[in-house]
Amino acid sequence: MKKTNKTFKRFAAITSASLLAACAMAPVFTSMTSYAADPDKGSITISNSTAGHTYEAYQIFDGELSDNVKLSNITWGTGVAITNDALDDLAKLDNKFAKSLTYELAESQTEAYETWKTNTSTDNPDADVSEEAYYVTLDEAGKELVKITPVPYVTTDEKVASKIAEALVSYGDAASFAEVIGKYLSDVKTGSSFADGTYTIGANDLLDGYYLVKDADNALTNEYDAKTSYIVKVAGTVTNIAPKIAMPEVDKEVWDNENDGDWDETADWNINDKYLKDGEQQAGFKLEAKIPANDNLEFYETYKIVFNDTMSAGVTFDGIRSVKVGDVDVPLYNETTSPDGYKISDIASGTAGGSFTLEIADLLKYDSDLTDADTIVTVIYNAHLNENAVVSNQGENSIENKNNVYLNYSNNPNWSSSGGNGDEELGKTPDDTVWVATYQILNNKIDGNSNEALKGVGFKLKDSAGNVIKLALDGNNVYYPSSTGEEIITSIGDDARIDIKGLDYGNYTLVEESPLSGYNTCDPILIEIKATHQEDSATAATVTMTDSKNMNNTIENFMGSTLPGTGGIGTTIFYLGGGAMAAIGGIYLISKRRMRKSEE
């Protein structure tokens, strides 16, 4: 009888690359050591795990052990409750193991089968053959019988267990077998105890056979931990398991414009600068999730990840730039066109200090095998600093504009969306944080002679290319870059301040444009902002100002030269000059008279 080739969604994460469920298969995870006290019984030990788990073992196959290796006379174990539905689910798997299975019809089913063949026709291929509504599945040609369900198998026939075991030996696909059998476990189980960093299941009292070992549905004490499942062989020995648990990681980086731009843990930006290049925004953040290649993940029904991102008050969200799984673009979810795309929580472009979640419901839609290589998921979103950004070169030079992310991910292989067993459990990674620095120059304007503040003096701030930077005023009388600001700003307040915040690393020129009446225009001031920034720990980053110039300036203005007037230096020169001319004239007259007398 042919079998249907329907694809069954992946379910439990099995840590073995070739998990075991058959009589002659060599266990991958088991390292057979000394015999237990009772040579007919054994134990399972689990290392490389953490406190907070509770493991349970269910006997799937029972049998007679020969040569301490092979099981014969295999029957179903006490840990499963095999039903026709379970066997039907096995037949639905799309693999060589399932395709190799053949089952005999019971006598009561044979008559129904013959009736079906008589009643059905090409025009009525889905005809019911009794009140029990046997459902008929056809092959791709749509003409031949594939199987009759839901009662096509002899569950009471002990040969069924043996046949499945033989198929598993031949095709080595015990993981897919476990994916189905995990839904049909009985109440007969053996629990674990934890001591000295090792879990022990069965104190030398496990009967020979194959066991499904799973995490119980308990709350883990470590929020960054994950659950898993195994199938192992017990053969009168201590069976040791050292599972490799796939723990995803998440990393957040910020775009830094130094050296033509790169991603780093720290950066420095101008306020309200999106750093456009060819019209495309460069300023932003990169989120990267790494799911290590691991056989644990092979049989998840679905594998979900959720980025949880939080921006500080000084950062404004500008929108998602790209979402990729490897090199594959993931579109924004759309019920009609992109039902498998990413979903983002409600956050509008232009939101300052916001948080959002970005979910990919099933990575398997974009990477069907999470076991062959690490899976990298990359999210880049645009953002910029706003006027709420905290200046880094004041106070203790710490960077306060910090932004963090953590990742939720599927971590319970015992959960299935089709199993009706409650909400999906998600693991959590530690937070990862990045920082953005920005700088401030301090200036005040005074009379160079009296030291009195000179309010209302106009200035322009220019970048290294000579472009004027428009500036607006915040609520604390501090200017900051803004496209809606003014090109000329004035000294304000009782102390005539021209403080400007939100500047990136680089060179700037402060140019006086409109001095007060009677005062000379002062020379331009070259400002050099040079700084190094670094992440010091998982929770802190600092800035070191190196060789910066003119970050704190007192700008003096002096009165210009005046026309001659009382008390002025000009009148003194005028008087001195006039007296000299008079003296010279008198000398000339006296000399001329003497010359006339001499001639007479």
Image (spheres, rainbow, N blue to C red):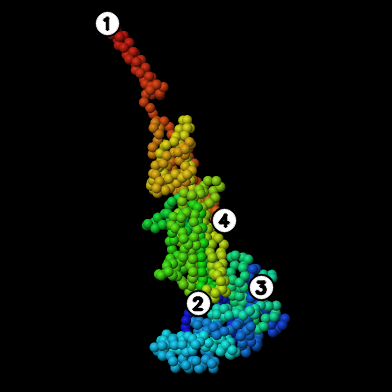
Q: What residue sits right under mark 2 in the picture?
A: 9
Real-space CA distance between mark 4 and mark 1, rounded to the nearest whole angstrom:
110 Å
Q: How many marks?
A: 4
Q: What residue sits right under mark 4 in the picture?
A: 539
Q: Nearer the viewer, mark 2 or mark 4?
A: 2
First in residue order: circle 4 vs circle 1: 4
- Say if residue 158 shows up in the picture: yes
Residue type at tag 3: Tyr
In the picture, the disc for residue 466 is: none
First in residue order: circle 3 vs circle 2: 2
Residue type at tag 1: Glu
Label 2 element class: loop
Label 1 element class: loop
Between 452 and 425, the one nearer to me in the picture: 425
* Residue 561 picture location, percent across and down: 39, 29
* Residue 358 picture location, percent across and down: 48, 64
Real-space CA distance between mark 1 and mark 2, rounded to the nearest whole angstrom:
142 Å
Real-space CA distance between mark 3 and mark 4, rounded to the nearest whole angstrom:
35 Å
Real-space CA distance between mark 1 and mark 3, rounded to the nearest whole angstrom:
144 Å
Q: What residue sits right under mark 1 in the picture?
A: 600
Between 467 and 580, the one nearer to me in the picture: 467
* Residue 23 picture location, percent across and down: 60, 86
Asked if residue 563 is positioned above or below residue 480 in the image, the reply reads above
Residue type at tag 2: Lys
Which residue lies at the image location 51% right of the left edge and 63% below the top edge?
A: 307
Between 404 and 5, the one nearer to me in the picture: 5
Q: Nearer the viewer, mark 1 or mark 2?
A: 2
Please tell me in which quadrant of the rendered image residue 284 appears.
bottom left
